[in-house]
Amino acid sequence: MVSPGGHTVRPPRHGASSGASSGGSRSTHSSSARASGGLTVRRLSRAAEDGFRSALVPGLRSGADAQRLAEELAFAATRLERLADDPPGLYAEVADASRATEERTWLAFLIAYLCPTDDDEPFAGVAQARTAWASGEPPRLDDIVTGPRTALEPGRGQRTIDAYRAWAQRTGSQEAAFTGDAAWTPERRFARVFERLGLPGLHRGARFDVLVTLGALGVYDLNAGALGLGGNDPVTLAAKRVLGIGDAMLLERRAAALATACELPLAALDLGFYNWERGERAGVGLDPATEPDPAFLDAANGALGL
């Protein structure tokens, strides 16, 4: 597909292949970013103004900040590609079409809710907490390690789990809840379910990520047509800083224009903006030190004039 500006737009990829699963119980400790291959992932401060200007990112005044944004967007797109082609860890179980859809959906929810860590066992906390959906047993949320984008609030997790089960049961199953109307487009389905998933204790990032995960791994026909920006969510704050405006509707339009110009799926802006705002890369199941796909990075650099 070609954009009005002549850029070739790479659409989000769906489907999945199985990979090796990882996980297991371990003792609780604080998570930290990994360093491998000589690359250290660390928190960065905003760079000084240096005359950089781009109509795509009018809020940025530093080439260094723009370069870091391009790298984070390319990393996020690389992660989405890995989810579709060779899902790591427990994502491979979600992608396995031979498993029951309800169990795949429940596992995807737990991964997004708890978030993989950025250490050598990113899925260990999820593996320790998980229970079978069919059992009706709540996940074991005490003394587990969670990742940087977790929505779990200590002592309040059961409230969210109960709300999620009640949400699914109102339509008869998770599958029915995530499918909605069979006539919906993938973008419409994503938007409607995202709205309906506004449950107690389930923040915007977790809602967005579970839908992206289920779509990328081929469980449901879901595709992000908007970022669902709003409130004080880190992605929303980053979007305001990068795109130079506060109005939610205009933010969505500028975000879509940025994704198109960079030849990236819109969903990549979620994790890309999050990591840019945080100043420290969260891998969310992928090694944070993974080099972005050069094609993604080149396209982003080119769009931003870097």
Image (cartoon, rainbow, N blue to C red):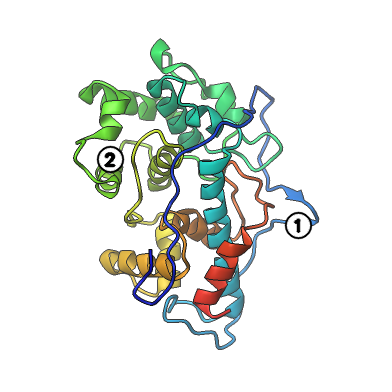
Pointer 1 or 2: first along the chain: 1
Is residue 153 in view?
no
Please tell me in which quadrant of the rendered image residue 44 appears. bottom right
In-front residue for pair 169/44: 169
Look at 33% across and 40% down and name the residue there. 221
Q: Is residue 135 above or below residue 214?
A: above
| Front residue (pair 8, 270) | 8
Q: Position of residue 250 (x, y in %)?
A: 29, 69
Instruction: Give the residue at x 57% y 84%.
Output: 49
**Residue situated furthest bottom in the rendering:** 51
Residue that protrudes farthest toward the top in the picture: 135
Q: Which residue is mark 2?
A: 193
The mark tally for this picture is: 2
Crowdedness near tag 1: few (<14), some (14–19) or many (≥20) residues, C-alpha within 10 Å? few
> x, y (%) of residue 193?
28, 40
Residue matched to label 1: 39
Picture coordinates of residue 186 (x, y %)?
Answer: 29, 45
Report crowding for label 2: few under 14, some 14 to 19, many 20 or more residues within 10 A (C-alpha).
Answer: some
Q: Is residue 270 visible?
A: yes
Residue 261 drawn at (x, y percent): 43, 71
- The residue located at (40%, 41%) in the rendering is 215
Q: Quadrant of the N terminus?
A: bottom left
> Could you tell whether 65 is left or right of 113 in the image?
right
User: Mark 1 falls on what kind of element?
Assistant: strand
Q: Amino acid at mark 1?
A: Leu
Point out which mark residue 93 bears: none
Q: Is residue 109 above or below residue 273?
A: above
Q: CA distance from mark 1 to mark 2?
A: 38 Å
Viewer-nearest residue: 203 or 82: 82
Q: Three-letter amino acid code at disc 2?
A: Val
Q: Is residue 295 above or below residue 14?
A: below
